[in-house]
């Protein structure tokens, strides 16, 4: 009813000419107000839209992380290479190595070596010292390991395992026990050869080629640590031609397979079960394994064993040089850019190196086409050679490359026990100069003997024993007791005899 009244009122007003203008003014004012209201609403709407867009854009830009990527069938998955080495089709890691076959072949060929020595107890009081006492002998037992290398019972072990033994016992993996005989030893390489007489053919290990062993290769150490028989540990070859002495004369295979007291003389084998080393030493402040172990390479051990069996002693083929590793300071003084190789500091007269024309200042780069980077690599290779063998040396002399064929000769010089004198066999010139045909010439002495003017004199007797060569000198000086008194006779360059007493 109200709407009808309004409509009727409007219609009535339109029938009045004087009120038409007022009506149109009213309508225009109403429309204008509506326009203004709509304009404000539209402005607010646009502001809201823009504010929302800005907020969303800021979130996308600064906070949201893209965590996926679409890949279509035409696209390749992106990747980054981290190495240019070919990967193994089998994968990588310890799962590729199978130690079971090597372990099975080895445990029955590794034996337990028991060394019984007798120690004598001295006087325990002043009264016993003055009035006499009965010397008591106490047996002591040391243990180690050994490797059977032939079915008839030859066993290789370390020299220090059987040193000073009065009785040796070998226990096989089947608990059978045998008394062992020492066939021969070589203290320099720390290798000894034993023999047992068994009723049946024994399981044994064949020597492998240690020169083919590679750094990073899996190996097993088998032995009897802490009297735990037939213990197998695994590791890798950490380094080759490792020397533990300052002279670099040693050449060990270094491994991180766990080796402890009792492992000495045991086997180091590859995953094929080939004997590539004789476990010998560890470096440890506690006496137990801390990550480093060392083995005599099989090529050296094999050569020592063959020499003992054939000659009764070790036949060492010597090059006849003194030298060492190159260091930055020495290389700079000599104008050498390359630090790889062995520097020749001197050449022994009448040696193979002397006959081949090697000179002081030469740098040995290769031997038989094998790269030589340090002195222990050279000595390690030569340790498997005999007198009469010929080796090819590649030298660097004044920046030029030379190739020399050198015939190795017998050991001509030696460092004597007790005194550390270096002596050599007499050369033709020495025989003529000193007027003697037998003896050894002193070429070097420790600083403590420097004031006695002993260099270039010839030792002809030790405690009345004639000295013919370095073997005699080594034997007699090895018998010197630190508590005894020793005299030896020398000839000087004037042909005069001199005597010296050591006490």
Image (cartoon, grey):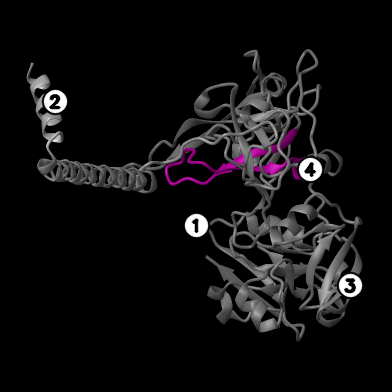
Residue with the mark numbered 4: 212
Name the secondary structure under disc 2.
Answer: helix
Residue with the mark numbered 1: 483
Q: CA distance from mark 4 to mark 1?
A: 48 Å
Q: CA distance from mark 1 to mark 2?
A: 146 Å
Residue with the mark numbered 2: 7
In this picture, residue 389 sits left or right of residue 249: right
Please give the range of residues in magenta. Answer: 275-301
Name the secondary structure under disc 3.
Answer: strand
Residue pictured at 68% horizontal, 45% vertical = 215
Return the residue nearer the eye: 80 or 199. Answer: 80
Q: Residues within 10 Å of mark 2 (few under 14, many from 20)?
A: few
- Front: mark 4 or 2: 2
In this picture, residue 256 sits left or right of residue 355: left
Choose the circle earlier in sequence order: 4 or 3. 4
Residue with the mark numbered 3: 402
Which disc, if any, is residue 323?
none
Task: Pick the quarter of the image with the N terminus.
Answer: top left
Choose the circle earlier in sequence order: 4 or 1. 4
Residue pictured at 64% horizontal, 37% vertical = 77
Q: Is residue 284 magenta?
A: yes
Residue 301 spot, x, y in % from top left = 75, 41
Choose the circle earlier in sequence order: 1 or 2. 2
Name the secondary structure under disc 1.
Answer: loop
Choose the circle earlier in sequence order: 3 or 1. 3
- Please determine whether, in this image, residue 266 is positioned above or below residue 416: above
Q: Residues within 10 Å of mark 1 (few under 14, many from 20)?
A: few
- Please determine whether, in this image, residue 16 is positioned above or below residue 90: below
Q: Residues within 10 Å of mark 3 (few under 14, many from 20)?
A: few
């Amino acid at each position: 009813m109200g709407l009808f009244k309004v409509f009727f009122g409007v219609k009535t007003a339109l029938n009045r000419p004087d009120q038409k203008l007022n009506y149109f003014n009213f309508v225009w004012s109403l429309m204008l107000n509506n326009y203004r209201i709509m304009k404000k609403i539209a402005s607010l709407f646009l502001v809201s839209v823009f504010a929302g867009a800005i907020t969303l854009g800021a979130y996308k830009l600064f906070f949201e992380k893209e965590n996926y990527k679409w890949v279509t069938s035409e696209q390749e998955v992106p990747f980054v290479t981290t190495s240019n080495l070919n990967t193994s089709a089998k994968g990588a890691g310890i799962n590729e190595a199978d130690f079971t076959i090597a372990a099975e072949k080895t445990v029955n060929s590794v034996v337990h070596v028991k060394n019984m020595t007798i120690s004598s107890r001295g006087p325990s009081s002043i009264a016993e010292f003055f009035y006499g006492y009965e010397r008591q002998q106490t047996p002591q037992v040391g243990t180690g390991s050994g490797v059977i290398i032939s079915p008839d019972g030859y066993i290789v072990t370390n020299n220090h395992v059987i040193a000073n033994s009065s009785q040796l016992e070998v226990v096989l993996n089947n608990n059978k026990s045998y008394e062992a005989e020492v066939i021969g030893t070589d203290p320099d390489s720390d290798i000894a050869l034993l023999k047992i007489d068994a009723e049946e053919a024994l399981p044994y290990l064949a020597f492998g080629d240690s020169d083919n062993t590679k750094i990073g290769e899996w190996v097993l150490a088998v032995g009897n640590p802490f009297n735990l028989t037939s213990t197998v540990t695994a590791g890798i070859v950490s380094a080759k031609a490792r020397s533990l002495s300052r002279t670099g004369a040693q050449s060990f295979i270094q491994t991180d397979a766990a080796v402890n007291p009792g492992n000495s003389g045991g086997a180091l084998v590859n995953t094929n079960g080939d004997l590539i080393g004789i476990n010998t030493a560890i470096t440890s402040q506690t006496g137990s394994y801390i990550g480093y172990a060392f083995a005599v390479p099989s090529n050296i051990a094999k050569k020592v064993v063959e020499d003992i069996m054939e000659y009764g002693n070790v036949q060492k083929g010597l090059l006849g040089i003194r030298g060492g590793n190159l260091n930055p300071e020495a290389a700079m003084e000599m104008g050498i850019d390359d630090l790889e190789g062995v520097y020749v500091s001197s050449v022994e007269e009448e040696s193979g190196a002397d006959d081949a024309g090697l000179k002081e200042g030469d740098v040995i780069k290769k031997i038989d086409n094998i790269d030589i980077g340090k002195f222990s690599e050279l000595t390690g290779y030569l340790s498997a050679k005999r007198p009469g063998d010929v080796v090819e040396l590649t030298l660097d002399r004044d920046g030029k490359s030379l190739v020399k064929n050198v015939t190795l000769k017998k050991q001509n010089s030696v460092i004597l026990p007790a005194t550390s004198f270096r002596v050599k066999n007499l050369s033709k010139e020495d025989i003529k100069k000193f007027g003697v045909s037998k003896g050894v010439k002193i070429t070097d002495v420790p600083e403590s003997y420097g004031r006695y003017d002993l260099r270039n004199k010839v030792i002809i007797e030790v405690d009345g024993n004639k000295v013919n060569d370095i073997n005699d000198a080594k034997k007699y000086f090895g018998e010197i007791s630190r508590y005894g008194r020793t005299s030896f006779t020398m000839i000087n360059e004037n042909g005069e005899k001199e005597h010296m007493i050591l006490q």
